Amino acid sequence: MRAEAEEFIRLHHAENPAAGDPQVRTAAVLAEIEATGTYVHTPAELAHGARVAWRNSNRCIGRLYWRSLQVRDRRHISDADGVAAEAVGHLRQATNGGRIRPVITVFAPDAPDRPGPRIWNEQLVRYAGYAGGPGTGTEPGSVVGDPRNAGLTDLALRLGWPGGPGTPFDLLPLVIEDGDGKPRLFELPPDSVMEVQLQHPEESWCEGLGLRWHAVPAIANMCLEIGGVCYQAAPFNGWYMGTEIGARNLADTDRYDLLPRVADHLGLDTASDRSLWKDRALVELNRAVLHSFDRAGVTVTDHHTESRRFLTHIDREGRHGRGVGADWSWIVPPISGSATPVFHRTYDTAESRPAYVHHPEAAARARGEFDL
Ligand code: ARG
């Protein structure tokens, strides 16, 4: 922790001259670590650390606006009820009537004698996935809802969740733990979750499919690591890029798997891959996502715009003397990659801190891998 703390204080002071003498702050931090086993970030360090962690997210194409991240300092909150209430407050602040604002809420960090709280859900808003099989009236292997969340749905049911109405888009409750290893459930108030019903600009059958998606992608189970301190509960959000929904969540065969239905409605020949029916269905599904978000007045970006912005980001960072690490396989959009400028170049893959990191235990919890 000492080395990571020193490095972070150096970075913070180099980028924020108003923070004062780095040597004075470093000495104080090292003394605090010596005495308590950890140290407390100033509000300015926390805010800058959270923003730089976004700047350092090699998989994120949307980093141009990293400085605009709104930081809600809730480090005094560590109980599950408080975390749940503030998670709802986070959604309201981020949703902002549809003009989505990038927001992070930072709860109590892990301390040597006392782990901080944890949110088990992968995101604050997730749709249940009910597994079929004996006694469910649906086939084994089939899932009603989002198969990605089948594990967490099963865990919520085992924890006593009565289940939702049984639609493909039932909101999961939050699963939150104080740090004691005992998860508790909290339903999201429906009015805290904005959703967009999908329709297509020309194809009227689309609305009849009853598709929808939530407005705010708020990652809830990544750890914010700043200067050796672990903030396990620090949900953060940006706004959606349409392809995340139209080319992945609704289209992947292990998610909503909607391309065959869309292609049928479009009257495409699905007998052979070489008709490119999947490609054509993907484009129309993505048009429906962008059109619907626009009509609903909900912020969404498209992959062409965001690709250009990302190159602007690289230029701007370069002018500040900073390189931009990036993971090509995540940055290039899942459709029409070669039609975007981010495809036609390579990136430095080096990772920097502060950072948002996946802890393997957190990923396992989000899959519902937990014995009651
Ligand atoms: N891909 C994830 C999803 O579809 C969200 C990841 C974060 N995305 C963002 N635009 N900030 O839910």
Image (tube, grey):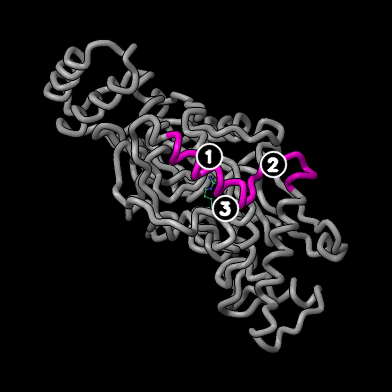
Q: Give the foreground label among 3 and 1.
A: 1
> In this rendering, does residue 185 appear at all?
no
Q: Does the magenta stretch include residue 305?
A: yes
Res. 109 mark: none
The foreground one among 92 and 161 is 92
Residue topped by disc 1: 237
Question: Which stretch appears magenta?
Answer: 293-316
Local crowd at mark 1 within 10 Å, few (<14), some, or many (≥20)?
many
As measured in the structure, the alpha-carbon distance from the residue carrying label 3 to the one carrying label 2 is 22 Å
Q: Where is 165 relative to 61, above or below?
A: below
Amino acid type indicated by mark 1: Asn
- In the picture, the quarter occupied by the N terminus is top left
Identify the residue at horizontal 52%, vertical 47% (top origin).
Answer: 123
Q: Percent position (x, y) of residue 219?
A: 49, 45
Residue topped by disc 3: 161
Identify the residue at horizontal 50%, vertical 54% (top origin).
Answer: 342
Q: Where is 65 relative to 251, above or below?
A: above
Q: What element carries label 2?
A: loop
> In this rendering, does residue 20 appear at all?
yes
Identify the residue at horizontal 79%, vertical 64% (top origin).
Answer: 209
**Which secondary structure is most common in the magenta stretch?**
helix
Q: Is mark 3 on a helix, strand or loop?
A: loop
